[in-house]
Each structure stands twice: as structure tokens, then as C-alpha cells.
């Protein structure tokens, strides 16, 4: 029998305690649907949004989010708030961001937690 509500899944990471490592991945792929949704949010046409927010990856096959220099890592997605370490377009973020990490564990968070325990510093930022 189908469940009337989604079953909550326990996850072993807490994005609120993380410096947002996943938002610093160089190739964050974005679909035309994502681009149109972001454009609508900013009052831009899909073409304008594509030009402003995306570029092609090195292989010139996929559209990826533009980056800007980051205060902690080399660079981060242009929509990343570098002081609050969170997404500024959360409600209209691309599908790939919604799905990540698509598991009960986040590899970076496991590493971060290990390093914080080792250093006995709950705010320690682990660089990879
Ligand atoms: S790296 Fe993992 S814990 Fe950190 S913000 Fe991304 S999903 Fe959350
Ligand atoms: S759109 Fe938001 S969640 Fe996705 S990479 Fe950029 S800052 Fe992170």
C-alpha cells in the first residue's frame, strides 16, 4: 500500500555546520529548465539568464554555473553567499543542487567531522 506521506530518511550530515564545499565544485551542471527558473526569479529571459549565470564546461558540451573567487576555497558558485556560507537562490536552485548528495552520508561532511574531532575544534574548516 502506498504511504500517505514521504517516509523521513535520516541523514548523517548537517549543511548548516559545513562551509558549503559542494557549492565550490567547478562543474555544477545546469539544465535549460533550471536556467529558465533562475531567469524568471531575476526577471530575465532564459537567454539572458544563460549568458549571465552559465558557461560551457571544458569539453564544451555542458552548461555549468559560473563561479567567483571564494574566501575559503579557490572559487564557489556565483550564487553562494560567502559570509553566511549558503545558497542565495535556494528556492530556485538547480535540480542537481536539490539532489546532492543523494545519499544518507556526504563524503565531505564525514571528512570534516573527522578533522574537527581530530583537531578538537568544532569550527575547523577542512580544505581538501
Ligand atoms: S558538502 Fe555536504 S554537508 Fe556540506 S553543504 Fe554540501 S551537502 Fe551539505
Ligand atoms: S545554486 Fe546554490 S546550492 Fe547550487 S551550487 Fe550555487 S550556491 Fe550552491
Image: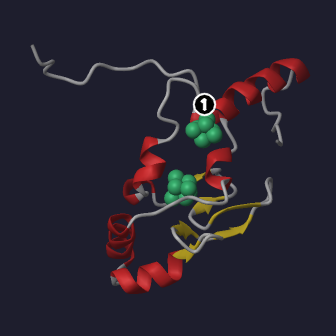
Please, which residue is most extreme toward the right here? 119
Q: Residue at x 83, y 42 (%)?
A: 127
Q: Residue at x 45, y 51 (%)?
A: 96
**Image vertical order of residue 92 relative to residue 18, above or below:** below
Q: Residue at x 60, y 30 (%)?
A: 106
| Relative to 8, 88 lies left or right | right
Please, which residue is most extreme toward the top here? 1
Q: Residue at x 70, y 44 (%)?
A: 19
Quadrant where ligand 2 appears:
bottom right
Q: Is residue 44 visible?
A: no
Q: Sort mark 1 into few (<14), some (14-19) or many (20+) by Cα contacts within 10 Å.
A: some
**Image vertical order of residue 90 relative to residue 38, above or below:** above
**Residue 75 % position (x, y):** 74, 62
User: Is the residue marked 1 within 8 Å of ligand 1, measured from its CB?
Assistant: yes
**Residue 111 % position (x, y):** 75, 28
Q: Secondary structure at mark 1?
A: loop
Q: Quadrant of the N terminus?
A: top left
Visual colour scheme: secondary structure
Q: Quadrant of the C terminus?
A: top right
Circle 1 residue: 106
Please, which residue is most extreme toward the left here? 1
Q: Nearer the viewer, residue 68 or 59?
A: 59
**Image vertical order of residue 11 relative to residue 49, above or below:** above
**Residue 60 % position (x, y):** 58, 74
**Image vertical order of residue 13 relative to residue 64, above or below:** above
**Residue 105 % position (x, y):** 57, 25
Q: How many marks?
A: 1
| Relative to 77, 71 lies left or right | right
Q: Is residue 33 visible?
A: yes
| Relative to 41, 61 lies left or right | right
Amino acid at each position: 500500500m502506498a504511504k500517505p506521506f514521504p517516509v523521513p530518511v535520516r541523514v548523517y550530515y548537517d549543511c548548516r555546520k559545513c562551509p558549503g564545499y559542494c557549492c565550490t565544485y567547478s562543474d555544477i551542471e545546469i539544465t535549460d529548465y533550471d536556467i529558465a527558473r533562475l531567469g524568471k526569479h531575476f526577471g530575465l529571459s532564459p537567454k539572458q539568464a544563460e549568458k549571465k549565470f552559465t558557461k560551457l564546461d571544458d569539453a564544451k558540451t555542458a552548461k555549468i554555473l559560473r563561479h567567483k573567487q571564494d574566501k575559503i576555497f579557490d572559487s564557489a558558485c556565483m550564487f553562494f553567499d560567502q559570509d553566511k556560507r549558503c545558497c542565495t537562490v535556494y528556492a530556485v536552485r538547480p535540480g542537481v543542487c536539490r539532489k546532492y548528495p543523494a545519499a544518507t552520508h556526504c563524503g565531505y561532511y564525514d571528512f570534516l567531522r573527522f578533522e574537527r574531532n581530530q583537531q578538537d575544534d568544532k569550527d575547523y574548516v577542512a580544505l581538501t
